[in-house]
Image (cartoon, helix red, strand yellow):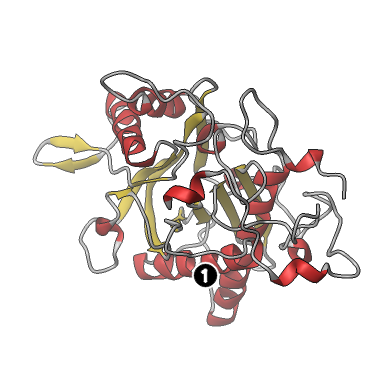
Amino acid sequence: MFRTGPRNLITDVAGLRVGNASDARLKSGVTTVLCDAPTVAGVQILGGAPGTRETDLLEPHNSVDVVHAVVLSGGSAFGLDAASGVQAALRERGIGLEVGGFRVPIVPSAILFDLRNGGDKDWGRYPPYRELGYEAAQTATADFQLGTIGAGTGALTSGLKGGLGSASTLLDSGVTIGALAAVNPTGSVTVSRTRHFWAAPFEIGGEFGGLGYPTPMPDDARHRDKHVGRQMETGGNTTIAVIATDAVLTKAAAKRLAISAHDGFVRAIWPTHTPADGDLVFALATGTSGIELSADAAIDLYAAAGATMARAISRGVYAATPAENDLFPVWSSRLR
């Protein structure tokens, strides 16, 4: 039986901290996951419109084995500047890969599209994401807020505000797995226009309302919600996420963990992985448990990756709060 970690956050995985920086006027922000020690990492991109930095080096056949942080940012391609701010913060602390006498922080990043969400994007010559990234790195801690914060500040779904979500699971093997997601998809996280989440079967302890599936299932549940008036008109969406564990994994196994975590997208969002989404999952394996998994225990880990990710996605939408000039309502305002 699955149970959550003490925080029910990705930081239940020992060796990780999360920092957020938000700009309410901009309706955008940055989230970073800092690694206390160099950490094995992988990535899997299944969306058709990704925006990334330093993801090629995460492929198992490439030579850099570890990262020092990963970044999730709003701002579309402008948000890729956020990684420079996180990199600057780490360099000040002497953190990085030693290359020819220099220390280079390895900070892969991904962005979501939140330009058309009611925020003021008239930022002048340079976008603010580098400074937001620096701020997020400076505030990283084990406890952090969910919902309308960090990379989830300006996120939207089909018909509701999105947000930043996280969850964790403790496995019988002694391993912990955690997920973090900035939820901004083309699709919907709820069944039709109800309050019921698609990820309901994976919920633990009423963490996103405890409503289960609607009974009976609405007649229009099989129809895609084509809600008008949001950024999907421009083809810009995306859910970007991190799956993490304290198990000892190789770089190839970390990539497999990222692949498995995409199952959580499928369980929580419909539709997902469309040509208009840049859906991406980073995987981090801190190895802090010291546990190397048997073949059978590894299957449990990969199953938990999808379930934990589905919960994190739902919790991000569940925790969203209203703000001025919102285009869409928050989940808590739905009456049925």
The residue at the far bottom in this view is 296
Q: Residue furthest front?
A: 228
Q: Amino acid at mark 1?
A: Ser
Q: Position of residue 288 (x, y in %)?
A: 50, 52
On screen, 44 above or below 145?
below
Task: Look at the picture and state if 80 lies above or below 92.
Answer: below
Task: Give x and y (percent) for residue 152.
Answer: 55, 38
Q: Quadrant of the N terminus?
A: bottom right
Front residue of this view, candidates 34 and 196: 196
Report the front residue among 325 and 315. 325
Q: Name the residue located 44 percent from the left edge and 36 percent from the top edge.
A: 115
The number of numbered discs placed on residues in the rendered structure image is: 1
Whether residue 236 is visible to the viewer of this picture, yes or no, is: no
| Residue 104 position by quadrant | top left
Residue 41: % across, % down: 38, 57
| 7 left or right of 28 in image | right
Q: Confirm whether residue 24 shows in the render.
A: yes
Pointer 1 local density, CA inside 10 Å: few below 14, some 14–19, many at least 20 = many
Choose top left, top right, bottom left or bottom right for residue 316: top right
Find residue 335 and report its horizontal and vertical position in percent. Answer: 87, 45
> As drawn, which residue projects farthest toward the right?
215
Q: Nearer the viewer, residue 227 or 268?
A: 227
Q: Classify 19 as above or below 205.
A: above
Residue at which label 1 appears:
260
Give the side of residue 103 with respect to residue 157, left or right.
left
Secondary element under disc 1, as helix, strand or loop, is helix
Task: Write the residue at 76% across / 58% down.
Answer: 3
**324 displayed left or right of 30:** right
Q: Residue at x 58, y 77 (%)?
A: 299
